[in-house]
Amino acid sequence: MGLMFEVAEGGFLDIDVKIVGPDGKTIHQGERESNGKYTFAAHMDGVYTYCFSNQMSTMTPKIIMFNMDIGEAPSEAGSEGEDSETASHNKLEDMIKELSTALSGVKHEQEYMQVRDRIHRSINENTNSRVVMWSFFEALVLVAMTLGQIYYLKRFFEVRRVV
């Protein structure tokens, strides 16, 4: 079994994660993690619980992308009396399962990259808007200073006559 997660949006992009087995024992517990990939063997049948907690920052909602992988139990070694066609068929079946698992891994990796791209795009757009606002502020200050200097120089060179 496996769990892969990524905090996509919200707060400092961190969350608490806990994996509990069917017997109530904690398999994994992590605090303030932004992403993770955990794989473990299920030693008993039952319901495994994945718990994501946002208790450290309850005021900030978070968006989490996660994938759960449930693999198949490892197959036992074939019996001695198998003929070559069945052994060849089983080998082909095993190769197809491996290929399917690898393809699933690539798909999950692609989804992970899409989430990372979305996060970085959001950061870049936010930074860009701040830079644009700062440049407008600087332009206004520059125009105000120019007008102030023109006014000051006009008053400086004004001829005042005392009658």
Image (spheres, rainbow, N blue to C red):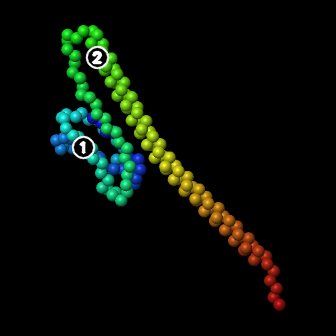
What residue does disc 1 label? 49
- Find residue 2 and report its horizontal and vertical position in percent: 30, 36
Q: Amino acid at mark 2?
A: Asn
Q: Is residue 22 above or below residue 15?
A: above
What residue does disc 2 label? 90
Q: Secondary structure at mark 2?
A: helix
Q: Residue at x 49, y 50 (%)?
A: 123
The quadrant where residue 25 appears = top left
For the question of whether residue 12 can be seen, the reply is: no
Q: Is residue 41 above or below residue 76?
A: below
- Find residue 31 and report its horizontal and vertical position in percent: 30, 49
- Find residue 57 and report its horizontal and vertical position in percent: 34, 57
Q: Is residue 136 above or below residue 9?
A: below
Q: Residue at x 37, y 55 (%)?
A: 61
Report, in whole angstroms, how far the alpha carbon at label 2 lies from the one at label 1.
Answer: 33 Å
The quadrant where residue 114 appears = top left
Q: Residue at x 64, y 65 (%)?
A: 141
Q: Secondary structure at mark 1?
A: strand
Q: Residue at x 76, y 74 (%)?
A: 154
> Badge 1: how crowded within 10 Å, few (<14), some, or many (20+)?
some
Q: Amino acid at mark 1?
A: Thr
